[in-house]
Amino acid sequence: MYADNKSCTLTPDSEFVDLAVEVFSLLADATRVKIILALRDDELSVNHLADIVDKSPTSVSQHLARLRMSRMVTTRHEGTKVFYRLTDEHARRLVVDAIEQAEHTVGRTHHHAADSAERP
C-alpha cells in the first residue's frame, strides 16, 4: 500500500512514528518475544508454545490475543485445535534484530546485518 512512499514514511515526522512506538511497547515483554522466537519457523498450538516458553497455556493465550490484535500473529483451525503463526516476517525481523543488538551490546557477536548473506 505504501510501497511507492516507503522512503517518505522513514522520516522523523512520519505519521507512523506513534504506531512504531506501540509495536515496541507490545514487544517489551519477554514472554511475547519468546513466543515470536518460537514461531519463527513453525506453526504451533497454545500448549506447545506454553511448553516452549515455560508459561501456562492461559498466560500464553493472553499474550497471543495481544499479538493477534496487533496482527503480528494469525491462526489456523484444525478441528478443535488452533495453530498460531507469524503473519509476516516483520515481527520476526524486529525480534531477531533486537536479540542481535543485545548480543552486540554485550560483545558476544561482531557481525552486522550487512555482513550477513542470509537475513532471518
Image: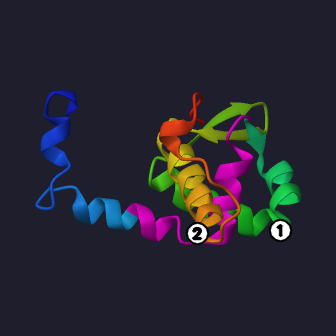
- Residue 67, image quadrant: bottom right
Tell me the SS state at disc 2.
Answer: helix
**Percent x, y for residue 57?**
80, 62
Check disc 2 and give the amino acid type.
Answer: Thr
**Percent x, y for residue 25?**
44, 71
Q: Is residue 117 above or below residue 71?
A: above
Residue 1 in view (yes/no): no
**Alpha-carbon distance for marks 1 and 2?**
31 Å
Comparing 98 with 84, the one in front is 98
Left of 21 or right of it: where is 105? right
The residues colored magenta run 23-42
Name the residue that disc number 2 marks. 105
Left of 38 or right of it: where is 99? left
Q: Quadrant of the C terminus?
A: top right
Residue 69 in view (yes/no): yes
Task: Kindly identify which numbered label has been placed on residue 29.
Answer: none
Check disc 1 and give the amino acid type.
Answer: Ser
- Residue 22, image quadrant: bottom left
Identify the residue at horizontal 17%, vertical 47% (top origin). Answer: 9
On whether residue 101 falls in the magenta region, the answer is no
Marks 1 and 2: CB-CB under 8 Å? Answer: no
Comparing 102 with 26, the one in front is 102
- Residue 84, image quadrant: top right
Identify the residue at horizontal 65%, vertical 71% (top origin). Answer: 106
Identify the residue at horizontal 69%, vertical 67% (top origin). Answer: 31
Task: Kindly identify which numbered label has been placed on residue 56.
Answer: 1
